[in-house]
Each structure stands twice: as structure tokens, then as C-alpha cells.
Image (spheres, rainbow, N blue to C red):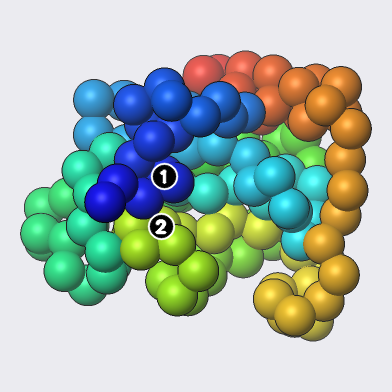
Amino acid sequence: MASIFSKIVAGEIPCYKVYESDKFLAFLDIAPMAMGHTLLIPKQEVDYIFDVDDTTLSEMTLVAKKIAKGIEQVVPCKRVGLAVIGLEVPHAHIHLIPIQKESDMLFNKPKLQLSKEEMSELCQKISQAIINE
């Protein structure tokens, strides 16, 4: 059965897309820990990130860097934290989260609730910053 992320890749479920290439897709998390919380996935469905082939994993890391630089241009933060949990959706993915302090990366804290308008505006700004990166 296809994961929710595979359905997003297939266009069956909409997303706030900030980046897309032939191999990867990045979109805003709909239950973000911080403004700009972005998920980066390989388009090929692989459950566990350490089962992704070496070339794709290396490329994914470079794409994550590019997206993080774009996020930093839009969202005030000290850093963009990177996390790989991999339990919530059976599709390899990286969380890119703007942070001010380490505790901003605690996944059990309450999530933000942003309006569609806020998400759309943020998506557009991050996408544009990535293009200009």
C-alpha cells in the first residue's frame, strides 16, 4: 500500500511544495513544529532512510542543505535543525526545522496551527528563496 507521501508525489493529495526535482520532493509539514518546518522525501518509496541507496542518500543530503539555506532566508532562526525519525510515515524523509534552541526539536511538543493563507505565503517565500539560492 502506498504511503501518504507516495500519494503526495502522485498528486493524489495536495501539499505546500517548496522544491521538486526528478528524484526529490520537499513540502511544508501540515503539523509544523515551527514556521517553515519542511519535509524532504525521495520520490521513490523506501520505508527506512538507511535503506535508500548511497547515491540517492548523498544527493538527498545536498538537497536538504539547499532547502535549509532557503528556509534560513525566510524564517528568522539560529539554525535549521535536521531530524530523521522515520516511525510516523513508512517513507524515508528528513525534517528540516528552523530552531532557536535545542528544545525546538522536541517532537512531543504541541504543533503549530497555521491557516491555509499562512502556509501558502510561507511556501511561496521559501520556494522562491530556494530558487534564488
Front of the two marks 2 and 1: 1
Instruction: Note whether residue 113 is visible.
Output: yes
Which quarter of the picture shows residue 81?
A: bottom right
To which residue does mark 1 refer?
5
Please tell me whether mark 2 sits on a helix, a strand or a loop.
loop
Q: CA distance from mark 2 to mark 1?
A: 9 Å
Residue at the limit of the structure toward the front, as seen here: 1
What is the x, y in percent for residue 4?
44, 46
Q: Is residue 4 left or right of residue 114?
A: left
Say which of 16 and 78 sits in front: 16
Q: Are marks 2 and 1 in contact (CB under 8 Å)?
A: yes
Please tell me whether mark 1 sits on a helix, a strand or a loop.
helix
Q: Which mark is residue 34?
A: none
Quick check: 125 above or below 69? above
Quick check: 33 above or below 38? below
Q: Residue at x 70, y 45 (%)?
A: 30
Which quarter of the picture shows residue 7?
A: top left
Q: Is residue 37 left or right of residue 56?
A: right
Q: Residue at x 69, y 19 (%)?
A: 124
To which residue does mark 2 refer?
93
Instruction: Note whether residue 84 is visible.
Output: no
Quick check: 79 above or below 130? below
